[in-house]
Image: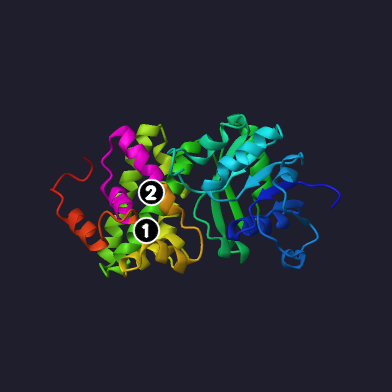
């Protein structure tokens, strides 16, 4: 390949979906994979594969990070070592389970935060691969970085909207995973559509509560990366977090449920990361806290639901 327009870290379902979209815009891609992938599986002359992460950062092209949150410190150390100073967009959704940090806060320790952008919104990888209409948010504090990635990704099938609220977009993307686990548990217990609607509505309020503490914009919470992403993942069987919750409700252990889903369930680590923030800011987020308790096997799903139902009566927005 004579030149590279963009690099991608992560050859999982989301990395491949983003690559598929970029190819539609005639971009030449260098993709990093931890595991050996046959070039025939990529089947496109505009994608080159590498199994050495350093090759990504010696390539002077914008970088797309599409790997799980737990890998970001490792990636960040390579960024710092290679003194990589190109635009970076983070497409993973979650909160670090050990620090309570969002993806931009993690990578921001290794490079200038002025280089960073976030991609978030309701977007199942399989539907992006099938060219079904998708709308997402690209958020960055740096307008030039935002423009680089907006131009790169935007097309007929993948509509990009701009934002400066990077933390708000990441908050919605992380908490929708946690709340989708709650909805999955509700569905697995057969609690019905009324309960699902209540969980989604009250869940959005929990995102809003912590969003206010973190200085996020209300418009972000009720936009594509907040309400939009939650509605998607709470209502469709393509959601791995929802399927995980269903398995938990039907008696699987956390490990068994994750094995049955067969993919990374970001809601697990995000829940642990959110618990750090809940304690730091002394927040009352009953649904999110119960998901944390269930994931850490402090309470079983039926007892957790019972605890929520027995909470004292109160006004809706207090």
Identify the magenta region. 271-294
In this rendering, position of residue 32 left or right of residue 244: right
Is 36 magenta? The answer is no
Front-lying residue, 90 or 219: 90
- Considering the numbered disc 2 on the image, is that residue within a helix, a strand or a loop? helix
User: Given this view, does label 1 or label 2 mark the residue nearer the observer?
Assistant: 2
Residue visible at 76% across and 39% down? 58
Which quarter shows the C terminus? top left
What element does badge 1 sit on?
A: helix
Instruction: Report if residue 300 is visible in the image.
Output: yes
Q: Which residue is mark 2?
A: 271
Query: In the depicted view, which residue is nearer to us: 49 or 113?
Result: 49
Q: Which residue is mark 1?
A: 181
Task: Name the spot of residue 27 as percent of width and height, x first.
Answer: 75, 51
**226 on left or right of 51:** left
Q: How is the image coloured?
A: rainbow
Give the image quarter of residue 217. Answer: top left
């Amino acid at each position: 390949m004579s030149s590279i327009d963009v690099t991608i870290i992560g050859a999982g379902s989301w990395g491949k979906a983003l690559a598929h979209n970029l190819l539609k815009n005639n971009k030449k891609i260098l993709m990093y994979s931890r595991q050996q992938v046959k070039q025939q599986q990529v089947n496109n002359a505009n994608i080159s594969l590498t199994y050495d992460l350093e090759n990504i950062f010696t390539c002077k092209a914008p970088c797309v990070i599409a790997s799980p949150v737990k890998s970001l410190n490792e990636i960040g150390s390579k960024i710092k070592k290679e003194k990589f100073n190109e635009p970076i967009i983070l497409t993973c959704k979650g909160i670090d389970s050990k620090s309570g940090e969002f993806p931009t806060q993690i990578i921001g320790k290794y490079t200038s935060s002025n280089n960073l952008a976030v991609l978030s919104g309701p977007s199942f990888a399989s539907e992006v691969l099938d060219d079904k209409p998708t709308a997402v948010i690209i958020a960055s504090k740096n307008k030039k970085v935002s423009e680089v990635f907006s131009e790169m990704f935007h097309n007929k099938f993948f509509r990009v909207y701009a934002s400066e609220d990077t933390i708000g977009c990441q908050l919605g993307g992380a908490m929708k995973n946690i709340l989708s686990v709650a909805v999955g548990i509700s569905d697995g217990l057969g609690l019905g559509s009324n309960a699902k609607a209540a969980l989604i509505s009250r869940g959005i309020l929990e995102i809003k509560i912590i969003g206010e503490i973190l200085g996020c914009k209300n418009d972000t919470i009720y936009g594509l990366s907040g309400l939009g992403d939650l509605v998607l993942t709470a209502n469709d069987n393509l959601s791995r977090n929802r399927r995980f919750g269903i398995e938990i409700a039907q008696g699987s252990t956390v490990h068994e449920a994750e094995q049955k889903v067969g993919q990374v369930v970001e809601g697990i680590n995000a829940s642990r990361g959110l618990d750090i923030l809940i304690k730091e800011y002394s927040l009352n987020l009953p649904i999110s806290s119960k998901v944390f308790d269930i994931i850490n096997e402090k309470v079983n799903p039926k007892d957790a639901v019972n605890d929520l139902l027995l909470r004292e009566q109160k006004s809706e927005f207090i």
